[in-house]
Amino acid sequence: MKKISVIGAGTMGNGIAHCFAQKEFEVALVDLSIENLNNAKTTISKNLDRMIKKEIINLQQKELIISRISFQTELNDFVKNSDLIIEAVTESKNVKIQIFKELDHLCKPETILASNTSSISINDIAKATNRQNNVIGMHFMNPVPIMKLIEVIKTNQTSENTINKIMQLSTFLEKKPVLVNDFPGFVANRILLPMINEAIQTLEDQVSGVSEIDTVMMLGMSHPMGPLQLADFIGLDVCLSILEVLHDGLKHDKYKPNRLLIEMVEDGELGVKSKQGFYNYENGIKNKIVNKRFT
């Protein structure tokens, strides 16, 4: 594989593009929004600057990495001739299916189409194409340049050749690929989101406060980040979307989204991205204070 396209220039998309470019792949990062593409380029540059400070790379290497990424608003010839395309757009089944339909018509038959979805059925996405054997899930973790795990999600139709290529590619990226079957939420979010949901319920029941709940899980369970801060980091809208997929797919009330979570999303309190979630991020993540709603 030489040419990689990433569809969606948000947090996950720009991180995925960064990782491939760092490993000397030619990368196209595609998004309809020029603003998103500009923000992605800025984010990648800042992340590379951090690597320079840690003496992982030098300035010349940074410039080479960025030069390998083309920032595009259209599915042009580069995308059509890519060896692998990774979709990393909003967590909407309908949006993803529409993208896969379009890619299926545009790309050469051997192109592998992957989704970075954190919960939506890969099988449902694959059915929108005429290449179900070449459709797979690659669920990267955030922040992508740092986190080592990739959940590789296969369906009954995914070919062994496709699986092997993606497992080998993930290892080449210096990630740890873990092969899982296609179930709602896969492994990571099927376990993580009910915990986050229960932490929110614990807050709503006034068992304890925001920072106190996070402290218990960090100091008592050795979690690097408390579940409420993690929810802010993921995005409360994303948490809600994943829980809805889990609840709909697994038909169990333990996955039913908490009322407080729904209310916060409706109020636009989405976490870090909106600078307001369980914590307030107006002054930066390091200087976070608890949302006034909970004080």
Image (cartoon, rainbow, N blue to C red):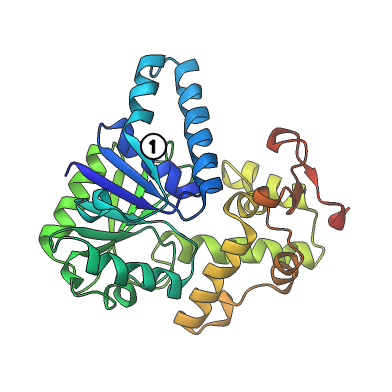
Q: Please say if 245 is above or below 38.
A: below
Residue 46 image offset from top left, x and y in percent? 52, 28
Q: Residue furthest left?
A: 161
Image point (29%, 59%), residue name: 114
| Image coordinates for residue 271, horizontal then vertical, percent | 68, 52
| Residue 226 in the image: above or below residue 136 | above
Residue ID for mark 1: 18
Question: In the picture, which quadrant includes the N terminus?
Answer: top left
Image coordinates for residue 135, horizontal then vertical, percent:
24, 65
The crowding category of the residue bearing disc 1, from other C-alpha atoms within 10 Å (few below 14, some 14 to 19, many at least 20), is many
Q: Say which residue appears at 52% left-offset and 60% top-offset.
A: 192
Left/right placement of residue 274 relative to residue 7 reads: right
Residue at 49% in and 75% down: 245
**Residue type, numbered disc 1:** His
Asked whether the viewer can see residue 58, the reply is no
Front one among 127 and 191: 127
Asked whether the viewer can see residue 221, the reply is: yes
Furthest toward the bottom, the residue is 251
